[in-house]
Image (tube, rainbow, N blue to C red):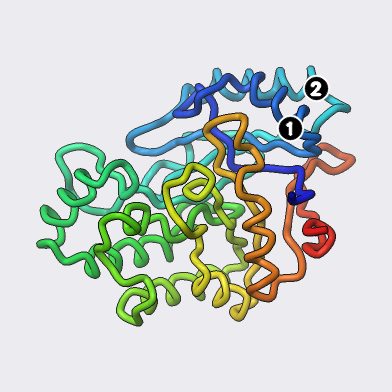
Amino acid sequence: MSKLRANFHTHTTFCDGSASAEQVVEAALGKGFEQLGFSGHMDPEIHMDWPAYTAEVRRLQRKYAGRIDILMGVELDNLYDPACCPGAEYVIGSTHFLDVQTPFPMSVDSSEEQLRELCEGCFDGDWLALCRAYYELEAQVHDRTNCDFVGHFDLVTRFNDSMRYVDETSSAYLGPALEAMECLVGQGVPFEINCGAVNRGRKAELYPRHELLSALHDFGGEILISADAHQPELLDGGFDVAVASAIDCGFTHVNVLAHDAMGGVEWRQLALDALAE
């Protein structure tokens, strides 16, 4: 089992999680966590009561001070207004929606039926065109959100294990993905290895998949590991797989966020080989 004891992609009942923020803190303490970052959704479909969320996280920071380092983050969608989350201590930049006109918000990870409708209605059934549009928008995620790290980079493949709408190893698919990745690495933004689809049994591979994670290393990119936990029991779900995958792709360290002595947020590095022991 991995020794990583921190997660920064965490959802609660403020958005689409199954437990309250305090229940999640208690679960994190039970797992021996040192840092816990909350990151509720702010996007065209799911957006929290931001004042209520920030008040509760600040309350928990005070209550649990000295026991666990709690950070107040947000998962901000590429197509949502960055002004919606004042005071966030870190931002996950995620792309759930495409920049197309739809009768209602249609995310790429909501359901197979909705994704098929999106492809047929906006891309004439051309799955590669949909993927290209996704990665063209993904390349802009830092410019649009000023994010601290990129969330689930290849989320557009959420249903590909079952639907098989694209060959994820083909150059036609990988080309636009690699262009977007190289652009974001050039902007200095880290990527999360997102365990959410794996730890919930929804996909066989992590985000980013192996070919993309290997390319991220070759591009000189930085990583952190996130459970994308919607249930408190999955706060460290998939961490052992993510650590092994990172090492296999050549990474030697993983990044974590923490408060410094002045109350600011800083990046710290942990050696991956120590986490895998």
- Count how many numbered circles sit on residues in the image: 2
Residue at mark 2 to residue at mark 1: CA–CA distance = 8 Å
Q: In front: 133, or 25? A: 25
Q: In front: 268, or 126? A: 126
* Residue that mark 1 sits on: 70
The image position of residue 92, as x and y in percent, is: 55, 48
Residue occupying the point 74% across, 48% down: 257
Q: In front: 233, or 102? A: 233
Compared to 175, does 262 lie above or below? Answer: above
Under mark 2, the amino acid is Tyr
Q: Quadrant of residue 126?
A: bottom left
How dense is the environment of label 2, judged by Cα within 10 Å: few (below 14), some, or many (20 and up)?
some
Please say if the residues under marks 2 and 1 sit with CB atoms less than 8 Å apart: yes
The image position of residue 53, as x and y in percent, is: 56, 23
The image position of residue 171, as x and y in percent, is: 35, 82
Direction from residue 206 to residue 37 in the image, left or right: right
The image position of residue 23, as x and y in percent, is: 65, 20
Under mark 1, the amino acid is Ile
Q: Quadrant of residue 193?
A: bottom right
Q: In front: 167, or 64? A: 167
Q: Secondary structure at mark 2?
A: loop
Residue occupying the point 21% across, 53% down: 100
Compared to 63, does 82 lie above or below? Answer: below
* Residue that mark 2 sits on: 64
